[in-house]
Amino acid sequence: MKESETIEFKETLTQLKRGVISIVSMLNKHQKGKLIFGIKDDGNGKGIDIGKNTLREISKTILDNIEPKIYPTVEKKLLDGKNCIVVKFEGELIPYFAYGRAYKRVSDEDRVMSKAELEKMILLNNKDKVRWDIQTNEKFSLADISEKKLKKFVKESGLNYTSKEEVLKNLELMRNGKLTNVSIILFGDSKNYFKTLNLRCAVFPGIDKSQSYIDAKDFNGDLFELIENAEKYILEHINIGMILKGMKRVDVPEINKDAFREAIINAFCHRDYTVPQEVQIAIFKDRLEILNPGGLYGGLTIKDILTKKVSKRRNSLIANIFHRVHLVEKWGSGIGKIRSLEPDVQFEEVADFFITTFKRKDIITSKQNEGLSGGLSGGLSGGLKELYIEIQQNSGIQANKISKNLNRPIDTIDKQIRKLVKDKLIERKGSKKTGGYYVK
């Protein structure tokens, strides 16, 4: 037996107060859990003396010191050949407090919740009353909705266009005569309302952010525009190879396009819009990262979404709209789709961001294997190949930067650059001072 985010061991009943705190921690994180007395930290049974009133005293202590009240199941059980007490509990009325303080479960530890964490939990728990996606805002008016965008959506989703007001009501984007937040970020006509909805993209020369980015761009607009801009930016900054299908050449990105597009859509569909952060695209030499603020919703863990294949929707209205135009599946199959297309994909939560990471592959474009001058049959040699990929991954890079990244003398880099320019594989753009090299 092992402790986890939903199981806690206590050796003796002298640890009952700590046990009550553990109950609250597990409730606030997972809304359920199990507390076992008579088990050592290493999972081996120790056993405890159980008197006539022991179970009742445990129940009373839990009832008296946890708010809101919970009514657990407290049972005597034989575990590992020892007398133990198992407390099972569940509750949905988060946040819960033990002895006047709120706690949360982190791995197998109980930690006091910060004021910000507590406020966020209260906000989420109020659900429909304060759920961001269905909140209305009196400063929005029908004039702020683009009729062109709305008509385009209606056509793509197979609906009939009557009027702005009627369509928005049918899509649940208008309540009691007022527009919701989601109506604006989907079909808004003014970018003044998109200040916290930006997309931030950057390309870094190495494998971390210790070196300054070599390309960066911020985008602003509605959700559909941001999704398209994110996809376009990635395609412009990763390697694109080619394969033959019949008599046609087909572009093949080093990362499956459908996989990273699904991750982009998930980022905008499931992000926390109450957090003043943008969705981020970070392209490194060895990987692509897609980061969306807010982390997983409703107590879900990475293990849950990978093994149990369950999902909870933070923004149901956005998910419903995306589903109408086939951007998302109704039953949250996005993670499975991504993994089927890119098996090496990784998911993690860091500092309240949910991060999807794709490994980059060493794809060589068809140009490299076309007849090159100088008798380089079979494609580029190792040194030229690395140089070509360096420029391909870092459009606009300068020679001195290439020299540093590849750890080669500048004279060697200059000579190799001249070779690739002569073979019409790369070109220089811009002024002598600020310009750099690009793949043709």
Image (cartoon, rainbow, N blue to C red):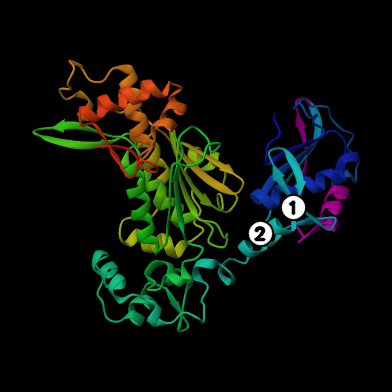
**What percent of the width, then of the height, locates residue 69?**
77, 60
On the image, numbered disc 2 is attached to which residue?
A: 121
Quadrant containing the N terminus in the rendered view = top right
> Quadrant of residue 414 in the image?
top left
Does the stretch in magenta take in 66?
Answer: yes
The quadrant in which the C terminus is found is top left
Residue 294 falls within the magenta-colored stretch: no
Q: How crowded is mark 1: few (under 14 residues within 10 Å), some or many (20 or more)?
A: some
Residue 191 appears at what percent x and percent y?
Answer: 42, 69
Residue 51 falls left or right of residue 169 = right
Q: Residue at x 40, y 52 (%)?
A: 265
Image quadrant assignment for residue 127 = bottom right
> Can residue 344 be seen at all in this image of the molecule?
no
* Nearer the observer, 423 or 335: 423
Q: Residue furthest bottom?
A: 177
Judging by the rendered image, the residue that carries numbered circle 1 is 113
Label 2 sits on a secondary structure element that is helix
Quick check: marks 2 and 1 in contact, CB under 8 Å?
yes
Residue 17 visible in the snapshot: yes
Towards the viewer: 371 or 88? 371
| Residue range corresponding to the magenta coloring | 56-81
